[in-house]
């Protein structure tokens, strides 16, 4: 079971996707504001966050960058009117998937499952400011 937040200004579509996730046994919440996503991510309440990339606050990646900092272990799925354009622009992004806004419930549920399995298999991200190699304790001899 995954804990998923869907943040999109198309409330009807977000509720449709959340209902499909609930029917598949996941917990799902819907919101419409960037700050709701960031607060929830900082609280560690979700495993996957799906968001409308063309919503106010997410454009140009500002909020996505903050999301990456405060919740590096949360899989992020982006929804956009032109997903191919976003994929070209964000080739090295941390998105688990970029889906068209018109995505169907079955495809979205599959994307969530894939995002979870891939995210769980990934090594943990380095902590900001952490040393790349562990410090060795001096040997006592």
Image: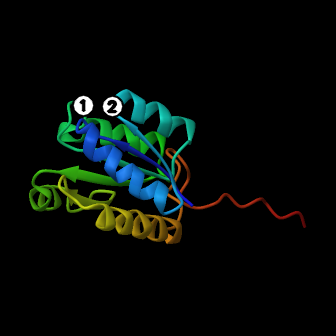
* Residue 65 percent location from the top left of the image: 33, 42
Q: Nearer the viewer, residue 94 or 118?
A: 118
In the rendered image, which residue does mark 1 sit on? 57
In the rendered image, which residue does mark 2 sit on? 34
Residue occupying image coordinates x 41% and y 30%: 36
Query: As drawn, is 36 to the left or to the right of 13?
Result: right
* Residue 42 percent location from the top left of the image: 51, 36
> Label 1 vs label 2: CA separation?
6 Å
Quadrant of the frame with the N terminus: bottom right
Q: Residues within 10 Å of mark 1 (few under 14, many from 20)?
A: some
Query: As drawn, is 73 to the left or to the right of 90?
Result: right
Is 51 above or below relative to 84? above
Say what secondary structure mark 2 lies in. helix
When asked about the image quadrant of residue 84, the answer is bottom left
Residue occupying image coordinates x 17% and y 61%: 87
Is 78 above or below relative to 97? above
Q: Residue furthest right?
A: 141
* Residue 101 percent location from the top left of the image: 19, 52
């Amino acid at each position: 079971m995954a804990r998923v937040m869907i943040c999109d200004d198309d409330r009807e579509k977000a509720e449709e996707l959340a209902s499909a996730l609930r029917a598949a046994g996941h917990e799902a919440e819907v919101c419409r504001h960037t700050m709701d996503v960031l607060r929830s991510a900082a609280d560690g309440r979700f495993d996957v966050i799906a968001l409308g990339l063309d919503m106010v606050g997410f454009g140009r990646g500002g909020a996505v960058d903050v999301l990456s900092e405060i919740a590096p272990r949360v899989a992020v799925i982006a929804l956009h009117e032109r997903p191919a354009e976003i994929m070209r622009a964000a080739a090295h992004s941390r998105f688990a998937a970029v889906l068209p806004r018109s995505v169907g419930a079955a495809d979205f549920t599959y994307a969530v499952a894939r995002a979870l399995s891939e995210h769980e298999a990934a090594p943990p991200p380095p902590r900001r400011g952490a040393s790349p190699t562990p410090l060795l304790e001096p040997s006592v001899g």
